[in-house]
Image (tube, helix red, strand yellow):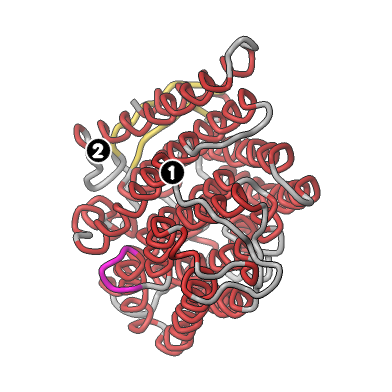
Amino acid sequence: MLTLSVLLPLLAAIALALLPRIGDRMARLLAVVFTALPMVLLLAVWMTDPPSGGFAAQFEAPWIPSLGIAWRVGVDGMSLALALMSALIFLAAAAWPMQIARARAYYAWILFLTGVSLGLFVTLDLVIFYVFFDLSLVGMYFLIGRWGHGDAQHAALKFFVYTLAGSLLILIAIIVLALSMPELTFDMRAIIAAPPLAALADGGTVVPGLVLLALVVGFGIKTPLFPLHTWLPPAHVNAPGPASAILAGVLLKMGTYGLVRLGLQMMPETFARWAFWIALLALASILWGAIVAYAQPNLKRRIAYTSVNHMGYTVLGIAVAGSAAGTETARALALTGAVVEMIAHGLITGALFLVAGVFWKRTQDYEIAHYGGLAEEAPRLAMMATLAAFASLGLPGLAGFVAELHIFLGAFAVYPWVAAAGLLGLLITAALFLQLLRAVFFGPRPAEGGVARFADLDRTEMAILSALLALVVLIGIWPLWLLELIDAATILAAPGGGG
């Protein structure tokens, strides 16, 4: 089923690309169907073969046996949760109503991105992981460059060059890890079970540190972490709303997922030596992202910088989980929080970028100062935006709070001063979202240069946003089902067997 969840959207993308007689409405319908099918298949995996103490639903077929490369798939709680969230974001993006040129090609690229993104989360082979990681850049490059607005071509090029440079560093690290194994293999399970550079971590050689540095920089660009984040705001501002939802909801998670899977699980000793410095890097992202977001007069740019802030919380949780300090319980709490933050951020920020897309669709204007009093004209939009904003600032009862509570409980037990400083990010985030809501929805209309009329959400837009944010509420009030699926203690134990 995991293989089908990857292949079906890829085959549908090829069909859309090669069959010119498919109309716009049919193209959208096919995109909705073939983004929904992977989610159904992944739910079936969860119901019939849930991860328990290792990787579940494993399948392997040889590809290049002489190099130890194979089509290997399988999921643990982290990867299955991320794959399910990603499938939902892609379904929302495909179903989102858009009036666009070249719709057939647009939906083909969404389906292509669906396949390669899900493939990255379910693969158990490092080479296949790298192939999907790079292919995701191609899909997003075209979505931004061909269907974006403003300076979309430049934003797409900057995104591609930055992230491609990071992926080359990741490739070097992958090669070193594989060559350091007793027998050449790219099997993630084998490398996790017997970390190949463990013996060198305390032996005075710089190789493990350089490999980890390559992973941190490569995945740090994708995440993105300060100061490697400068490609993100222009990419978001100039991308169409659904593409921004995919970029924030799915592609950024490839960075933090890779940091856990490759950095934390395959290099635990080296990661522990540098965990404190990674935590400081996360703290810089938390504070910088929140402070700069507060200063943005552009709605979409403000949301974009909050991603730097929230992914900083995720990396802080990962750093705490990989440290040698504190208790195992504290480290497991932090990793649980990091994974929940990935899920929560995907749902919440995906919804926020779809909300931003509503503004562009109606007015082609993101300037916050040009709006005011929209709660009267667009009450449904105001309700959805307010719920998403409160979730993003970590209000109790919503998914963001569950994630941040776990992260900070673990962080205070391991790096208390870093955790205390990170709390400032929560205050600034609350201020920037409350100011945004007051200005756009509840404040007075601007005297000059304001938007004259604004249509409320239609039924399709309302249904999609309601589905995303209903999950945010569900995780906030009943997180047990998600926490049991993730099972961070199992991830920290570096499972190598099947489930």
Q: Quadrant of the N terminus?
A: top left
Q: Tell whether 282 sits left or right of 470.
A: right
Q: Tell whether 130 sits left or right of 268.
A: right
Q: From which residue to which does the magenta span run?
A: 395-399
Q: Tell whether 267 sits left or right of 2.
A: right
User: Marks 2/1: CA distance?
Assistant: 33 Å
The location of residue 214, given as percent across then percent down, is 65, 58
Q: Secondary structure at mark 2?
A: helix
Please tell me whether the stretch drawn in magenta is mainly helix, strand or loop.
loop
Q: Residues within 10 Å of mark 2 (few under 14, many from 20)?
A: some
Tally of numbered tags: 2
Please determine whether, in this image, residue 201 is positioned above or below residue 186: below
Quadrant of the image occupied by residue 87: top left
Q: Residue at x 25, y 68 (%)?
A: 397
Residue type at numbered disc 1? Asp
Disc 2: which residue: 46
Is residue 287 visible in this depiction of the protein? Answer: yes
Q: Secondary structure at mark 1?
A: loop
The location of residue 470, given as percent across then percent down, is 29, 53
Residue type at numbered disc 2? Trp
Along the line of sight, the residue nearer the viewer: 381 or 413: 381
| N-term-proximal mark, 2 vs 1 | 2
Q: Residue at x 35, y 60 (%)?
A: 340
Disc 1: which residue: 458
Of tags 2 and 1, the one toward the viewer is 1
The location of residue 224, given as percent across then percent down, is 60, 61
